[in-house]
């Protein structure tokens, strides 16, 4: 079994930050041809990551979060998301394999075919679902949720995870991915990208990439396409999350070099959100159809199609110049 790159670089983390492998590494990179881009366009495809019933970027976070739940003696994961939550489904499918039950607090958003399919999967997963409808009702229900899901065998609280698993610990999943990408660049599998473009739904993927790219010594910057209006998602917030993950690594014993993370490491574009989270847009639909027909790439409307729509428009306007651009596909259907 291959050790995670964080453990290989800083062996002292193996004891203080345990890791549970849930997928096969590395995920593939390839040219993303057929979309007519001016800049050299590459794909890092996370869609196949994960051995369980769901894949994609959420599984990377669970590899660090599930061992922490055991370290705390928790018996239940409590987390939140929208009705069609990919994150909640991944947690609901992988946590029981580690002896943990899962409770999900869900808030409303527009319902489409993908959402209905996700709800069927969530109901079949065995997780306890709480339909709280609004963020306000979720906040008010928090004390009851903690009491409801505390263990009757001793005062053990559920292990609470924020939306998307985007805690400082969960964010290490994409620190690891950035180190993996750097190894693929070093091995000549792709040129060093000028930009990595990814959807930003809760922030952990973009923040982890930015930290990992600096640790790897790459000059690559992260361009996050904001697709969620229910959380604070700006460069300051994401940079703060990256710095918290950096502090976590240092506190657990890693002798990291000076990094000097700044707001320039993560650039955000909010122009592709549309009316709000999970609301479809014409640009995203066009990008989704174009990706499927011209590049053989399966996306979805809420995250990845909006991110690709932004990438294609920015490329057409010359935003990237002649630098290679890497699109991160985080969607992991099964």
Image: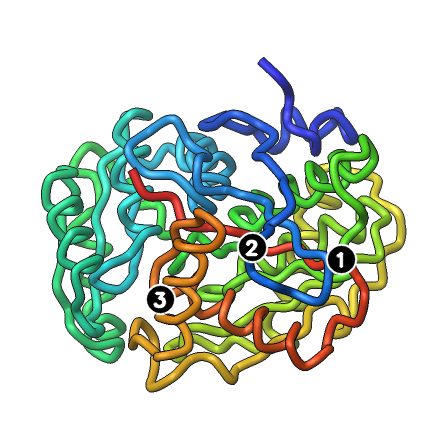
Q: Position of residue 43 (x, y in %)?
A: 60, 48
Please rate how many residues cluster around mark 2, counting C-alpha atoms within 10 Å: few if below 14, some from 14 to 19, many from 20. few
The residue at the point 60 percent across, 33 percent down is: 17
Q: Toward which corner of the image does residue 94 lie, by quadrant?
A: top left
Res 157 visible: no
Q: Could one spot residue 47 in this view of the protein?
A: yes
Counting residues from the N terminus, which is met first, the one under dot 2 or under dot 1?
Answer: 2
* Render colour scheme: rainbow
Which residue: 59% across, 73% down? 237
Which labelled disc corresponds to residue 324?
A: 1
Residue 12: quadrant of the picture: top right
- For marks 3 and 2, the one nearer the N-term is 2
- Residue 123 location, x and y as percent? 10, 46
Task: Tell me the element at label 3.
Answer: loop
Q: Name the residue that disc number 3 marks.
A: 302
Q: Nearer the viewer, residue 55 or 210?
A: 55
* Residue 34 - label: 2
The label nearer to you, 2 versus 1, is 2
Q: CA distance from mark 2 to mark 1?
A: 15 Å
The residue located at (16%, 60%) in the rendering is 113
* Image position of 222 with respect to 271: above or below: above
């Amino acid at each position: 079994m291959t050790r995670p790159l964080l453990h290989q670089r800083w062996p002292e983390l193996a004891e203080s930050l345990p890791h549970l492998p849930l997928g096969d590494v590395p995920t593939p990179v390839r040219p993303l041809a057929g979309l007519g881009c001016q800049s050299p366009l590459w794909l890092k495809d996370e869609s196949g990551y994960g051995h369980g019933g769901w894949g994609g970027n959420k599984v990377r976070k669970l590899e660090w979060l599930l061992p922490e739940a055991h370290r705390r003696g928790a018996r239940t994961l409590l987390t939140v998301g929208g009705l069609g939550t990919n994150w909640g489904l991944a947690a609901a499918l992988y946590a029981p394999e580690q002896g943990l039950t899962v409770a999900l607090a869900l808030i409303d958003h527009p319902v489409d075919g993908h959402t209905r399919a996700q709800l069927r999967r969530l109901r079949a997963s065995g997780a306890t679902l709480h339909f709280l409808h609004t963020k306000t009702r979720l906040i008010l229900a928090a004390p009851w949720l903690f009491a409801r899901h505390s263990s009757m065998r001793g005062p053990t609280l559920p292990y609470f995870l924020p939306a998307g698993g985007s805690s400082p610990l969960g964010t290490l999943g994409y620190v690891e991915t950035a180190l993996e990408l750097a190894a693929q660049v070093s091995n000549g599998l792709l040129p060093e990208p000028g930009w990595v473009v990814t959807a930003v739904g809760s922030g952990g993927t973009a923040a982890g990439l930015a930290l990992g790219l600096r640790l790897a010594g790459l000059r690559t910057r992260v361009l996050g396409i904001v697709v969620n209006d229910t959380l604070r998602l700006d460069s300051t917030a994401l940079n703060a999350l990256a710095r918290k993950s950096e502090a976590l690594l240092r506190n657990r014993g890693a002798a990291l070099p000076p990094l000097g993370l700044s707001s320039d490491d993560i650039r955000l574009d909010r122009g592709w959100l549309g009316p709000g989270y999970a609301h479809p847009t014409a640009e995203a639909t066009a990008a989704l159809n174009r990706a499927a027909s011209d590049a053989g790439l399966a996306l979805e409307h809420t995250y990845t199609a909006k991110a690709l729509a932004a990438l294609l428009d920015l490329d057409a306007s010359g935003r990237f110049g002649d630098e290679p651009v890497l699109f991160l596909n985080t969607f992991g259907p099964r």
